[in-house]
Image (spheres, rainbow, N blue to C red):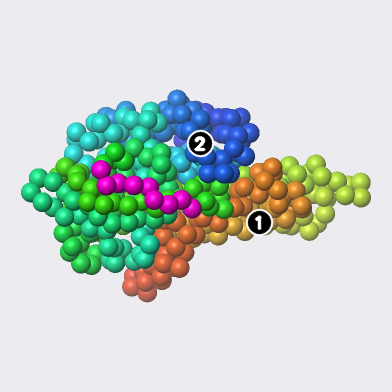
């Protein structure tokens, strides 16, 4: 793996780190009640990284998956809610618009993504169907030069703030995976409504949205054929960005644990002098570094999308590492770790999301096993790293 970063990329990453540590970290408590981190998002826009997934011709940076993952990793070290908000601008929804939308829509929406004026939301999960995309009930009917959309989506991030919704839906009632397409919906569309709110243990709010005879222009049907394959291909990127947040949560919790155990004393000595504490820190560190290697390898496989086998493996590993490391960090903080005021508590709660979003761990384990049984994939040392 070539992990070299040129000077421009180093400076960009350093700017994100400085902003996160000096600005986002002190404000972390403000977003536990579901408040959207507008101030943080605007500051990310000011330094140019909010358009990390937007092509350069539309004012963005057009960064590769690896660079995008590094940025999200830095943000999530200090604030899960802000990292998830930034993921909305770097994830599947942005890539769907930049890849499949007509030029007029791209020219109108993507520059606003870069400036923070337009927050994007992706609508996939339905009350009765999450991973089971083939059973979507949301449906769009093509009528001459217009579209009529009906259905309900749930557990949607950023719904009240979004300026555009990327909605995966059935087209003309065609059954199964073959009938899946994608439409773009603006919140001002008659018949659109945010109808429910769920507050999460991570701090952010998720929402239910409904489409009741929403009439849309024909050009808003951005994916009509082969939508399921295109969705899964784009989602391999999400399966690198989701775990980059998990990795950052683990790193942030580890950093806090090291500082706390060096400064907290018991019987006149720092608790870091205890062998049990030192061993726990050692285990946390090695698990983080193992997860990092898997994630970076998956990110660097992108051409333009990451390898599905590598991204699934990295996602599970980073998600579970985050849960374990943040939990250990809470334990090392004792009773303080259980309070909102200590960062490790917030990182611990955010970590629990990773295995649920972007493909549940159980689904991905099935994908990995099928690939192994079909192709005989197995670890093959240095050759697997250099593509031989």
Q: Residue furthest right?
A: 267
Q: Quadrant of residue 380?
A: bottom left
Q: Quadrant of residue 57?
A: top left
Neighbour class for label 1 at 10 Å: few (<14), some, many (≥20)?
A: many
Spatial CA span between label 1 and label 2: 25 Å
Over which residues does the magenta segment extend?
Answer: 190-198
Give coordinates of residue 113: x percent, y percent.
Answer: 35, 33
- Mark toward the start of the polypeptide (1 vs 2): 2
Find out whether residue 254 is within the magenta segment.
no
Relative to 326, is 108 above or below?
above
- Say the numbered circle drawn on residue 327: 1
Q: Is label 2 in a helix, a strand or a loop?
A: loop
Q: Which residue is mark 2?
A: 37
Dominant SS type (magenta): strand
Give coordinates of residue 142: x percent, y percent.
Answer: 13, 52
Give coordinates of residue 260: x percent, y percent.
Answer: 75, 44
Q: Say if residue 317 shows up in the picture.
A: yes
Q: Is label 1 in a helix, a strand or a loop?
A: helix
Q: Quadrant of residue 26?
A: top right
Find out whether residue 191 is within the magenta segment.
yes
Give coordinates of residue 354: x percent, y percent.
Answer: 50, 55
x 45%, y 56%: residue:
357
Left or right of 216 on screen, residue 60: right
User: Mark 1 near mark 2, Cβ–Cβ under 8 Å?
Assistant: no
Of 277 and 84, nearer the camera is 84
Neighbour class for label 2 at 10 Å: few (<14), some, many (≥20)?
A: many
Q: Say if residue 387 shows up in the picture.
A: no
x 85%, y 46%: residue:
265
Left or right of 55 on screen, residue 104: left
Relative to 98, is 135 above or below?
below
Q: Residue furthest left?
A: 144
- Say the numbered circle drawn on residue 13: none
């Amino acid at each position: 793996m070539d992990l070299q970063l040129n000077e421009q990329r180093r400076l960009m990453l350093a700017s994100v780190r400085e902003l996160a540590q000096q600005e986002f970290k002190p404000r972390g408590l403000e977003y536990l009640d579901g408040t959207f981190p507008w101030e943080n998002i605007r500051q990310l826009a000011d330094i140019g990284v909010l358009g990390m997934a937007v092509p350069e011709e539309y004012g963005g940076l057009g960064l590769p998956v690896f660079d995008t993952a590094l940025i999200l990793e830095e943000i999530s070290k200090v604030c899960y809610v802000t990292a998830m908000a930034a993921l909305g601008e770097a994830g599947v929804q942005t890539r769907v618009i930049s890849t499949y939308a007509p030029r007029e829509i791209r020219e109108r929406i993507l520059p606003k993504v870069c400036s923070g004026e337009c927050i994007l939301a992706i609508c996939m999960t339905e009350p009765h169907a999450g991973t089971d995309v083939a059973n979507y009930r949301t449906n769009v009917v093509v009528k001459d030069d217009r579209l009529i959309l009906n259905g309900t989506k749930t557990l949607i991030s950023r719904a009240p703030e979004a300026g555009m919704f990327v909605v995966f839906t059935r087209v003309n009632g065609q059954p199964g995976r073959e009938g899946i397409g994608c439409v773009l919906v603006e919140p001002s569309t008659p018949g659109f409504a945010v109808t429910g709110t769920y507050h999460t243990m991570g701090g952010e709010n998720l929402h239910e949205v409904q489409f009741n005879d929403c009439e849309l222009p024909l050009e808003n049907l951005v994916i009509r054929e082969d939508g399921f394959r295109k969705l899964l291909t784009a989602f391999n990127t999400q399966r690198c960005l989701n775990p980059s947040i998990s990795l950052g949560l683990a790193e942030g919790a580890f950093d806090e644990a090291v500082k706390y155990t060096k400064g907290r004393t018991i019987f006149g000595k720092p608790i870091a002098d205890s062998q049990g504490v030192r061993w726990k820190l050692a285990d946390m560190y090695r698990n983080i570094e193992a997860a990092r290697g898997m994630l970076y390898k998956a990110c660097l496989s992108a051409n333009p999308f990451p390898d599905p086998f590598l991204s699934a493996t990295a996602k599970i590993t980073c998600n579970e590492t985050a849960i374990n490391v943040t939990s250990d960090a809470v334990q090392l903080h004792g009773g303080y770790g259980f309070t909102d005021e200590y960062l490790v508590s917030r990182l611990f709660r955010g970590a629990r999301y990773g295995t649920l979003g972007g493909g549940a761990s159980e689904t991905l384990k099935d994908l990995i096993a099928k690939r192994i049984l079909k192709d005989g994939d197995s670890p093959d040392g240095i050759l697997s790293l250099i593509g031989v």
